Image (cartoon, helix red, strand yellow):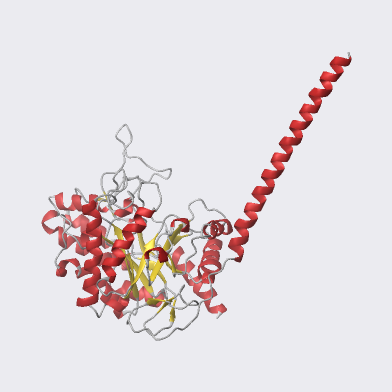
Amino acid sequence: MEDNFSNAKNTNSKKTKIIVIVVGVVLIFYLLISLMLSIFFGHSRDYRAVSQVDYISTNTTGLVQAGTTSKSNRSLYDKDGNRLLLKGINAGNLLLQEGWMSPFALEPMKNDDGSYAKDKDGNILYPEFYEEQFLTAIYNNPNLKDNAEELIDYYRACFMSDIDFKIIKEDMNFNVIRLPFYWRNILNDDLTLKEESKAFAYLDWFLEKCKENDLYCILDLHGAPGSQNSIEHSGAIPPQPELWHNENNENAVINLWDYVSSYYTNVRKDLAPYIVTYDILNEPLEKADGYSTKYIADFYDKVYRAIRENKDYHVITFEFVWDDSKAVDPAEYGWENIMYQNHHYNWDSVNIDVYKAYFDFFKIGHDFDVPYLVGEFTYFTDDDMWESALDDWYDAYGYNWTMWNYKTTVVGWWDSSWGYQVARLNLDVATEETKCNVATCTEEEFRLACDATKTENCQTGYLKKTIDAYWERFEKKQ
């Protein structure tokens, strides 16, 4: 009996030790998590960019410049040396198609039985539609191909006209437009440079309108040859990005920026002051679903040097996705007069303080003395998130920002927070009316689809209210 008692006692003792160890491990784990969260949120709460000043010595370049002193290098300054904060919007879907924002499509998605695939509200669904498909379709459609270039120009004229620049300046009270453009705007099919009259016709027009309306422009290479990220908005969706490790494609991007830089430094000097920065490459990923890498930073350096060799002193912007942990120390490359950029899309509606803390935390060790641009962002229809992001984050930190997007298209009658101007197509669900199929449509149908995007045919909604509310709060703080 004593042996049984002793065995039971030993068993209970072992169980007790195991319980104590488990509880101890759990407590240690809890304390570690608590400490990490404390550091995580504490850094975000206490973080502020180093002091910035409102004036530096007179700028002699005639261009917007990044600061040059220990207290100014996180800010931009205009040609007169006054501190400049960029607040504006993107002109996405103007020079390259993003299907979900476009009045055009190809054949709708279909079910196995051949019927149209639809969402829960009966709206017809469409596969991703991107610039290469758009161009292929329009140049192969027998109804459109003879007038293809004229029709593309007509679309652009509808999507962005004189009135839109005035609205952005006067109604929205913004000072900058980020212009996403495509490699084919500047380069031929074989990656050679287009002649100046063709390569810069639209960019010149856009910059002239910015000049007329006292607006700055960010020239953003949104789609590169082969795609820099295999995402729809790059113009193509290969399985893996085909820009990288392809000497022809990489050299084409270097040549493109060398051409743009030389042109606006030597030919159209009058427009150069209205280019606030060259945004070298939108959301670059060395591998699909990946991140920016050292390889991409090394490539940036080649572009940087090509621009500077032209004696071009524009601010140069580099993007590192998806957070600042991928940003490199500019001193490693000897970069000067640059700006870093990130994009904020809170897809999962994470609490804004948590979302902000995430980005702040990953700035640790990568918080370099350069101006910062939030080049794309939206907070959908969450008023509190918009207010917290604009007021307590971007403005409080002195970040420059351009929200996404000026104009968008919806298939129905509803509003969309994705656009200040919303083209509501009001497609008839009952008759299964579809978007304009650019591969089969007539010229009349194509032009009607373009007409739907004219500002006079669009409506403002949620985003206008959001911007108006921001400026009301801003004025009260002055």
Name above or below for residue 226 compared with residue 408.
above
Q: Can I make out residue 317 in this image?
A: yes
Direction from residue 384 to residue 401 in the image, left or right:
left
Q: Quadrant of the C terminus?
A: bottom right
Return the x and y of residue 309 as percentages of the image width and height.
26, 71
Query: What residue is drawn where x is 36% and y is 60%?
Result: 408
Give residue 14's quadrant in the image: top right
Q: Is 426 in front, or is 99? A: 99
Quarter of the image where one finds residue 320? bottom left
Residue 411 appears in the figure: no
Residue 125, percent from left and from top: 35, 45
Up/down of 389 relative to 270, above or below: above
In the visual, does 443 lie left or right of 326? left
The residue under the point 16% across, 55% down is 189
Where residue 50 appears, x then y in whole percent?
Answer: 53, 72
Left or right? Give the position of 414 relative to 194.
right
Give the answer, above or below, for where 321 lies relative to 402. above
Question: What count of labels does the image hold?
Answer: 0
- Residue, far left: 146
Taking the view exactly as shown, the residue that stands out farthest to the right is 2
- Percent across and percent down for residue 383 are 53, 62
